[in-house]
Amino acid sequence: MSKPSLLLLAESRKEGRPSTSSGQTVLFFLAFCFTQPAAAAVAPGTYDGSQTELATRLVLRADGRFQYGLSYGALDEQAQGRWVEKDGQVLLTTEPAPKPPRFAVVSDTPKDGDGIEVALDDPELLQGSPLTMVVTFAGVAEPAFVEVGEDGRLPVPPGKTITALVPDLPVFPIPLAPYAVKPGGRRIVFRFEPNDIGIAAFAGEPLTIEGGTLVLRRYDREIRFEKEQN
């Protein structure tokens, strides 16, 4: 409150009348306090979340864009797009949205007898590891992981019927679209199409704000990003 307002308030009290000027000053002060925007909890800059066996960095730019990179064992991923701060979180959205990898069917031919044989058109893709299929059985909600035999045959438990399947891609966190299986004996060959593999498909991915730390939960790890000092 200004000095003239204080003098006017004192004079008004002596004369037993209310001070219009002082009341307006108080109201103006309260309005000023409540209309000022809160300071942003997150400062743009470079944040480092590296820890044992994991290297990662996040850059939040003042124009609302972000850049992200992570290396964890055999997994490497990156992303760029837009970030916003909302309800105590930083939300990341990849732009443009990446096209996920997939297994395309090269051929699906009938074979003698029952059962299913599967193969990849590029066996080197597995680097010596056995081929594992994500199998959906009729009447079962959750898919099962079934390892293919050396002869290419997919073992099926008695009484079970396969309705869909797709090769497993362990380094990709999102399940790939399954392929519907036709009745009878089949021999199916798949081809891997990487598309935008390695680009994280963030769609409002939340990072919790804890003071000056941004916390991301990914790949069963808690990643704590600390702002680098210039």
Image (cartoon, helix red, strand yellow):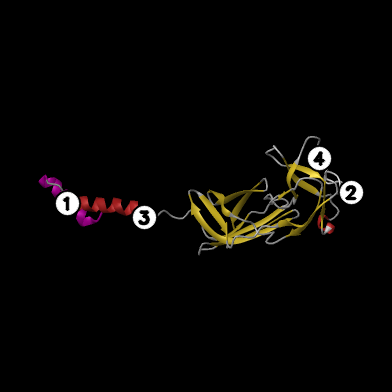
Q: Looking at the image, can residue 67 be seen?
A: no
Q: Amino acid under label 2?
A: Asp
Which element is circle 4 on?
Answer: loop
15 or 162, which is in the foreground? 162
Residue located beneath label 3 in the image: 36
Q: Is residue 107 left or right of residue 45?
A: right
Task: Estimate the x, y position of residue 9 in percent, counting from the top left.
Answer: 18, 50
* In this rendering, the label closer to the viewer, 1 or 4: 4
Distance from the alpha carbon under mark 4 to that under mark 2: 14 Å
Task: Estimate the x, y position of residue 39 in percent, counting from the top left.
Answer: 44, 55
Question: Mark number for residue 20?
Answer: 1
Distance from the alpha carbon under mark 4 to that under mark 3: 66 Å
Distance from the alpha carbon under mark 1 to that under mark 3: 24 Å
Q: Looking at the image, can residue 214 be seen?
A: yes
Q: Is residue 11 left or right of residue 160?
A: left
Toward the left, the furthest residue is 15
